[in-house]
Amino acid sequence: MAKGYAGRDVRALIAYCPHCTRPTYFEGLTGLLLPEEHSLTLQVPSVHPGEDLRFLPPEIAPLYDEARRCMSVRAFTATAHLCRKLLINIAVAEGLPPPHNVKFIEAINYLEQHNIIPRNARSVLDRIRVIGNAAAHELPQVTEADAHASLFLTAATLRNLYDVAAVAKAKP
């Protein structure tokens, strides 16, 4: 049974995570401490979405973790913007000389021209770019679905570049 506070008319709960012992807020729970007619509609912060990636370079890992934390608190625009920024950081980590203002297209072209990403991965990076551009340059907020897509595609890119490569290089 979850530890927390709930009353008869309360439709929310603050509980402590058994893993990190920090509080998390639930709204509209079913079955724990609230009536059955309510369902879970919100948890803040939620479990960090996205994959746990073990072999990210030190200049990439903090940004990816930040994007996951943003998603867990429903900061969708920030998530999408960070995923776009990660692509530039990947290019710099892979050898693109870092001038003060690396243009996004230069970073993507570098990744493609130096065979860091597969030929068919350009469409993946373009989808991250389009969502990230909306986050950076347009007034409407990024939707939850677009933020999830951006984080998923970013994780897939990072997994292929770093985790898969590390496992392939490991000696049996």
Image (cartoon, helix red, strand yellow):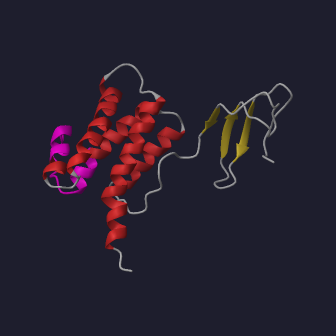
Residue located farthest toward the top when viewing the structure as drawn: 139
Q: Is residue 98 magenta?
A: yes
Answer with left or right where residue 48 lies relative to residue 84: right
Drawn side of residue 23 relative to residue 152, left or right: right
Quarter of the image that includes the C terminus: bottom left
Residue 111 x %, y % = 19, 50
Front-most of residues 61 and 111: 111
Mark count: 0
Q: From the viewer's side, name the closer residue of 167 and 4.
A: 167
Displayed quadrant of residue 79: top left
Q: Considering only vertical position in the picture, is 139 above or below 115?
A: above
The residue depicted at 37 percent of the width and 62 percent of the height is 163
Q: x%, y% of residue 7?
A: 85, 31
Rendering coords of residue 71 (x, y %) = 49, 39
User: Is 70 placed above or below 58 here?
Assistant: above
Q: Which residues make up the magenta segment?
A: 88-109
Residue 80 among those drawn in magenta: no
Relative horizontal placement of residue 11, taking residue 86 as reference (left or right): right
Residue at screen point 75% across, 28% down: 38
55, above or below 106, in the image: below
Residue 8 visible to an observer of this rendering = yes
Q: Position of residue 117 (x, y in %)?
A: 23, 52
Say if 14 sits above or below 136 in the image.
below
Which residue occupies the extreme right position in the image?
8
- Write down the quadrant of residue 40 in the picture: top right
- Seen at 27% across and 49% down, the residue is 89
**Residue 63 visible:** no
Q: Most extreme residue toward the front, as rendered?
A: 120
